[in-house]
Image (cartoon, rainbow, N blue to C red):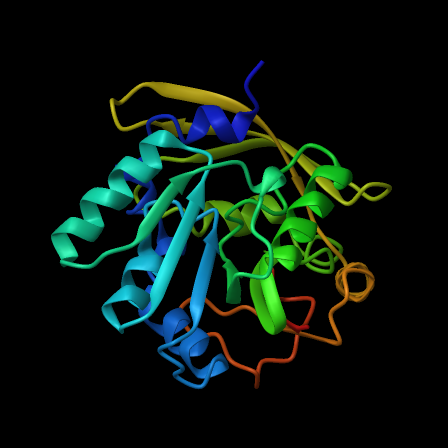
Amino acid sequence: MKQWYEVLFENYSAKYEKEPFTQGTIGECDFIESEISGNKGARILDIGCGTGRHSIEMARRGYRLTGIDLSYSMLSRAKENAAAAGVSVDFRLGDARDLHFEKEFELVIMLCEGAFPLMETDEMNFRILEGAARALKPGGKMIFTTLNALFPLFHSVKEFMESNTGDTGTKYDGLNFDLMTFRDHNITGVDDDSGVRRDLRCDERYYAPSEITWMMTSLGFGTTEIFGAKLGAFSRKDRLTTGDFEMLVVAEK
């Protein structure tokens, strides 16, 4: 049986690109570039690359990108977008839980919940981080965003999501944040690219900062820094607060 994220991205690439949370690419890539000091020799792995927005923008700037995604539809759109932009990106169909790279990249990025933390078990989510860690060369860096568990303790996830859907028609019902597992269960209603309505039973894991720090340390990262993740404006100046729906993680081997 397919999981909700597999069903969602079977036919959602055009709608995905209109989502409000996909509109901050330039500013986010500015941050990524600053974190590698503009080293054009760096190889970058984009896990859960979707329609390729970060990979393509970084390729425009002269970097070498490999993009991995579970969705054939999203990758097809990514390849079309790269061709239209006149850049070359090595897009590959693959499962983030089963990466086979070994010390090949200077940087791994995993943004906008590209894979982690959508998996149905904590073990699967951890496997994604393990594979990403293996893919890095010594001294390499990982930059990713994930859902901030501090947010739903103080705010309504439903209100936040519905205020950030734009005109996509996405609706959220039955939200239930489990304090024992830090998982949000909800029914997300979306219209796919063909106009077919899909009601998906979603299950997303929110993480506490201390959990992230512990996992990264256990995977051999020497430093892990966590910031608030502002759409299109990632910055080391943004201290993580309970008002941040996402956190930005920067970890170095």
Can residue 147 be seen in the rendering of this structure?
no
Q: Is residue 94 left or right of residue 145?
A: left
Q: Is residue 153 above or below residue 78?
A: below
Dividing the picture into quadrants, the one containing residue 142 is: bottom right
Asked whether the viewer can see residue 14, the reply is yes
Image position, residue 118 (x, y; %):
60, 40
204 shown above or below 85: above
In this image, 177 relative to 40: left or right?
right
For the residue pair 128 and 9, the one nearer the viewer reads as 128
Q: Residue 214 location, x and y as percent?
A: 83, 63
**Which residue is at the front of the view, 103 or 208?**
103
Residue drawn at (39%, 83%), measured in percent from left and top?
A: 38
Count how many numbered circles sit on residues in the image: 0
Q: Kindly identify the residue that appears in the image at 49 percent across and 27 percent down.
A: 6
Q: Position of residue 206 (x, y in %)?
A: 70, 49
Quarter of the image where one finds residue 213? bottom right
Q: Residue at x 59, y 71 (%)?
A: 141
